[in-house]
Image (cartoon, rainbow, N blue to C red):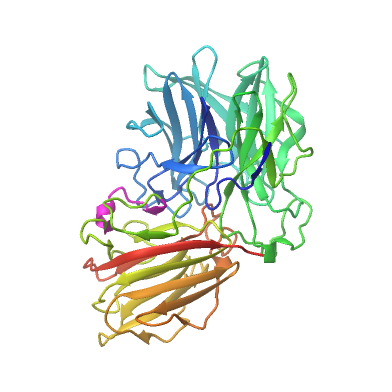
């Protein structure tokens, strides 16, 4: 027996949906405004995972231009039936105020690598859709329904279900509201299972913060009524101070030999903030727990006896840091620390923002030894933003890049960026002064919404001609920038707040749902599309106390 170490998908990988096909396990997770859409990881042992595809990779399937921060692709559901993979996903176009514009789609593929079909539009009544394949061959779409008429924080109108017709490629028949949740409210994230003559409905409740929980109900009849588990919440970290917090939004899988596991999202607040006191029912508003890695994916072993509700194998309902597993170990080669952009495709660790037309943002062939970024709109543009980045997957890390550019003026700039969203970033940029002198500067926006104040922590530093090496050292809540031209590294002598690059920081519109990235970007606010060439990128995780 081995122990699986949580989280199994570190860094921004929320809302996991898991499926087993033979000896292979796949997890789909949300990608929000990042393109291509939906991450799918593969494993043979539930402990070691490798990214295998992002299937929503063309305009016919997904166009996120204009989507807000933490909009876009929410809560995919991945299933397998009738020789096909079925992937359900939401594209959220609006997420603030009383209304949500959340459009739900279905794509299919004969194998996990594709080809993935063009989408079938399903509905827009709510989000977190999932597809249940019943034993009689009929298929049912579930999603939470959004009730904009309700006041206050709970506009979650219950879990609704409607039949999906494969022949008609559409939803058919009446809509059934099958479950309205518990007094924790905010009922979402439905998954339905049939076992021992029962229909079991798994939901998420309590929002995505420190009150988050997993709730189960069951019924003998597909349409209900569904009776809530007497224990109410099968999993929650409410009121605890353990490693894994904000646990919720789960899915269940059974192994080849009948063991049962539950994957769920979680977060890991920085240790220097995790020990703050927690009040009954969740964290106080004036606490400063911050989780730069965003919402990650963890796993728990379940005991599910015949005719009973499942329970965590280790007892109670708080998450464990590890999970026992008997599957033979199947590790993958580690991801290389150094990336050289000498191929014709962007390396799989990297994504960009929103657009299905990346050729407007970058080229892998314009210069054979570089990633060429075309400066587009300003930092935080919701349309054309030339930012290419990878997830921060360690609480502490080192990132370095080498950039070759000659800025035309101060409206043309490029460099290394620690990024969460439009109002949360730290940016070490090569640019020019008004008289054309090439300089290095820092733009920092530490969650100052709605003013989005950009501060300049250093006096611009003149740079000689030639490529420039840029680096950052992140140690938990602190970030330090450095640079090098033809000699040793020079530290800029400032410490920036990396904890601001997190879900919990700032005063933005509503909750934030993604996680920290680090990468490279180019901007040309004059609209001329002037470029910068990225010669290499290195990311190396470090232990954090």
* Residue 221 shows in the view: yes
What's the residue at 30%, 42% (across, down)? 59
Q: Quadrant of the N terminus?
A: top right
What's the residue at 71%, 40% (across, down)? 235
Percent x, y of residue 352: 37, 54
Percent x, y of residue 518: 45, 62
Circle count: 0
120 sits to left or right of 149:
left
Query: Based on the displayed image, in which of its 4 quarters is residue 377 positioned?
Result: bottom left
The answer to whether 20 is drawn above or below residue 247 in the figure is above
Q: Quadrant of the C terminus?
A: bottom right
What's the residue at 55%, 38% (across, down)? 147
The answer to whether 232 is drawn above or below residue 535 in the figure is above
50 sits to left or right of 460:
right
Q: Which residues are magenta?
A: 349-362
355 sits to left or right of 98:
left
Find out whether residue 353 is within the magenta segment. yes
Percent x, y of residue 216: 68, 31
Give 49 or 303, whichever is nearer the viewer: 49
The answer to whether 315 is drawn above or below residue 209 in the figure is above
């Amino acid at each position: 027996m081995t122990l699986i170490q949580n989280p199994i998908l570190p860094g921004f990988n929320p809302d996991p949906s898991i499926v087993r096909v033979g000896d292979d396990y796949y997890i789909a997770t949300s990608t929000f405004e990042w393109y291509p859409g939906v991450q799918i990881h593969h494993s043979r042992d539930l402990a070691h995972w490798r990214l295998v595809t992002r299937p929503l990779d063309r305009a016919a399937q997904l166009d996120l231009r204009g989507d807000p921060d933490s909009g876009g692709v929410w809560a995919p559901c991945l299933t397998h039936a009738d020789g096909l993979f079925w992937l359900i996903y939401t594209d959220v176009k609006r997420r603030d105020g009383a209304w949500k514009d959340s459009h739900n789609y279905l794509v299919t593929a004969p194998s996990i690598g594709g080809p993935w079909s063009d989408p079938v539009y399903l509905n827009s009544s709510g989000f977190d859709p999932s597809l249940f394949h019943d034993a009689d061959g009929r298929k049912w779409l579930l999603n939470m329904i959004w009730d904009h008429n309700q006041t206050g924080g709970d506009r979650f109108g219950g879990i609704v279900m409607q039949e999906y017709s494969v022949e008609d490629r559409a939803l058919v028949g009446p809509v059934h509201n099958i479950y309205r949740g518990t007094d924790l409210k905010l009922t979402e994230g439905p998954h339905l299972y049939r076992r021992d003559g029962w229909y079991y409905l798994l939901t998420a409740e309590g929002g995505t913060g420190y009150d988050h929980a997993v709730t189960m109900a069951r019924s003998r009849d597909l349409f209900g009524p569904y009776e809530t588990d007497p224990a109410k919440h099968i999993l929650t970290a409410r009121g605890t101070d353990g490693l894994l917090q904000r646990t919720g939004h789960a899915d269940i899988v059974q192994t080849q030999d009948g063991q049962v596991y539950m994957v769920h999202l979680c977060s890991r607040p920085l240790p220097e903030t995790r020990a703050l006191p927690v009040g009954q029912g969740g964290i106080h508003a004036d606490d400063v727990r911050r989780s730069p890695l965003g919402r990650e994916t963890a796993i728990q072993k379940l005991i599910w006896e015949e005719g009973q509700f499942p329970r965590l194998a280790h007892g109670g309902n708080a998450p464990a840091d590890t999970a026992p597993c008997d599957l033979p170990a199947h590790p993958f080669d580690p991801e290389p620390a150094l990336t050289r952009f000498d191929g014709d495709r962007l390396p799989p660790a990297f994504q960009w923002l929103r657009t299905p037309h990346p050729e407007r943002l970058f080229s892998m062939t314009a210069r054979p030894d570089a990633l060429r970024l075309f400066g587009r709109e300003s930092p935080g543009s919701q349309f054309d933003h030339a930012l290419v980045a990878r997830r921060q997957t360690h609480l502490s890390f080192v990132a370095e890049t080498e950039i070759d550019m000659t800025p035309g003026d101060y409206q043309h700039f490029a460099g290394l960026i620690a990024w969460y969203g439009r109002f949360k970033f730290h940016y070490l940029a090569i640019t020019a002064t008004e008289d054309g002198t090439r300089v290095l500067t820092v733009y920092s926006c530490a969650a100052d919404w709605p003013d989005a104040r950009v501060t300049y922590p250093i006096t611009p530093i003149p740079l000689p001609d030639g490529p420039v090496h840029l680096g950052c050292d992140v140690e938990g809540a602190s970030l330090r920038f450095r640079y090098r031209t033809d000699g040793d590294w020079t530290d800029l002598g400032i410490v920036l707040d990396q904890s601001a690059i997190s879900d919990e920081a700032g005063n933005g519109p509503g909750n934030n749902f993604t996680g920290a990235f680090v990468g490279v970007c180019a901007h040309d606010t004059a609209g001329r599309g002037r470029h910068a060439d990225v010669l290499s990128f290195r990311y190396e995780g470090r232990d954090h106390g």
